[in-house]
Amino acid sequence: MSILKREFSKLIDMYKEVEKDKVNDDEFRLKYHLMPPIGWLNDPNGLCQFNGEYHIFYQYSPFDAKGGLKFWGQYKSKDLINWNDMGAQVYPDNLNDCHGVYSGSAFVENNQMYFYYTGNVKEVGDFDYINKGRQHNTIMFKSNDGINFTNKKLIFKNIDYPENMTCHVRDPKVFKKDNNYYMVLGARDKNDKGCVLLYKSSNLEDWSFINIITSDEKFGYMWECPDMFELTDKVSKNTKTILCISPQGIEKNGYKYNNIYQSGYFLGNMNLNDGKYDFKEFTELDRGFDFYAPQTFLDEKNRNILIGWMGLPDIDDDYYTNPTVELGWQHALTIPRVLELVDNKIYQKPIEELKELRKNQITKRLNNISIYDELKAEVFELDIEFNNAVNNFELELKEDCKITFNKYKKLIKLTLGNSGYGRGCRAVDLNELSRLQIFSDTSSLEIFVNGGEEVFTTRVYPKNNKDKIVLKGNLDNAKINLYELGEYRYV
Ligand code: FRU
């Protein structure tokens, strides 16, 4: 262990000692979501499964619940239920990453884990930090056990990126296709147009540039956290290349693009030889208030698993301050979701492993009633299958959050009240409502609509009526399954 790493880890342990009781006593600590032990968390990083074990790294600022110097924190697990908290594992410890170990990914092959990330360096001076003053270095390191990591190797500096790039080039994601390896990097060009850089390698260490991938029309000024992977459509059986990005600078348009920044995907065909991608429409991955910078990985069962950050960057204190900040921590990751492509649309399914957490089950079939308020729970999974076409439906929970569906408006909507700091509503067009699957934790909601056709992810902080569940509307023949959920176990 380097001296710097040893000293940093001592300091983090001291902060933890001071903060841990306050953090752990917080009523809003989540039961089955990964959170920072103390301090701040943002993007999921380095997601992979290696020799049976899942590794979930994350952007981690242990010293300040509002962010700051970034490390990679790490959790690992054999079953996605019992976790080892490995704490901070990748440190800013050299001239190429001294202002932060920024986001990146993992690639696993032949008993080796390869990690790629962005080393952030912010030079001191009078700079705009867009065109000047910032270094975004692409760096790699390896591991053959997920615990010990090799020295870091610099792959690219700013001058290695195409000439028309600003200093914002980051978040490498590596994948394999046929016998080659590819890397996508998110970028902002000098015309303030978001794009992705595509590189190719035959040995995972030496990379050559292929192309700048960008839409014809400008779609935001920066594309963060790119991800590229294939899914085979369950209906057409065609294999598509998904380009997932987190674009910044997109204008709100009706119910679309309502958060400060977006996350979503294009579905197209990729020619990896010339790096040409045929762009189709962009679809948001999530419709809620708190979702950003998702990353996917393929596990040993060949599942495409997505995990997102249940939060957003650059949130203004006037808009809302997460109440956990004063208790010394902020943010969490979403539950893992398995991706499927169905008729040209990505569906997200809560990962099966979470069934392990189910405790009590209440099953009900509703008949001839328009209000049902007998259920009470705080940390739960609620599965509602609507037997008949639903015209009007409302579910109120977590003090005063409302999910409403109106068949005439063809809209499903999530409205936050006090417990969501009055942040308003988010909605998406929906023709029919056939199923709602709701994962509720102490301070979060993940709502899967029609088997994952749409998802709403949001943080909420109920103070009263935390266990309220009230259903209203056309409930005839609706089948309800409510499961209380237990907690992740940390070893
Ligand atoms: C996305 C992001 C990434 C960057 C990281 C820094 O939330 O801005 O682009 O690498 O966070 O923490």
Image (tube, rainbow, N blue to C red):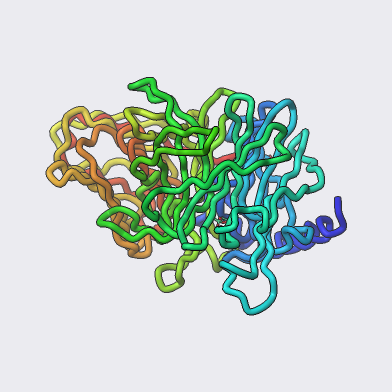
Q: Nearer the viewer, residue 356 or 61?
A: 61
Ligand 1 occupies quarter: bottom right
Relative to residue 213, is residue 364 drawn left or right? Answer: left
Residue 385 occupies quadrant: top left
Residue 93 occupies quadrant: bottom right
Residue at 38%, 49% in the rendered image: 216
Q: Is residue 25 at all visible to an observer of this figure?
A: no
Q: How many numbered marks appear?
A: 0
Q: Residue 127, position in %: x, y?
A: 61, 75
Residue at 24%, 45% in the rendered image: 429
Residue 280 occupies quadrant: top left
- Most extreme residue toward the bottom is 126
Q: Measured along the vertical axis of the image, is residue 153 above or below residue 6?
A: above
Q: Is residue 151 at all visible to an observer of this figure?
A: yes
Q: Nearer the viewer, residue 39 or 42?
A: 42
Q: Nearer the viewer, residue 286 or 95?
A: 95
Q: Measured along the vertical axis of the image, is residue 96 above or below residue 336?
A: below
Residue at 69%, 28% in the rendered image: 109
Relative to residue 12, is residue 333 drawn left or right? Answer: left
Residue at 74%, 58% in the rendered image: 96
Relative to residue 129, is residue 264 drawn left or right? Answer: left
Which quadrant: the C terminus?
top right
Q: Residue 197, position in %: x, y?
A: 55, 47
Q: Residue 53, position in %: x, y?
A: 66, 31
Q: Measured along the vertical axis of the image, is residue 99 above or below residue 142?
A: below
Q: Residue 210, position in %: x, y?
A: 58, 41
Q: Nearer the viewer, residue 276 or 351?
A: 276
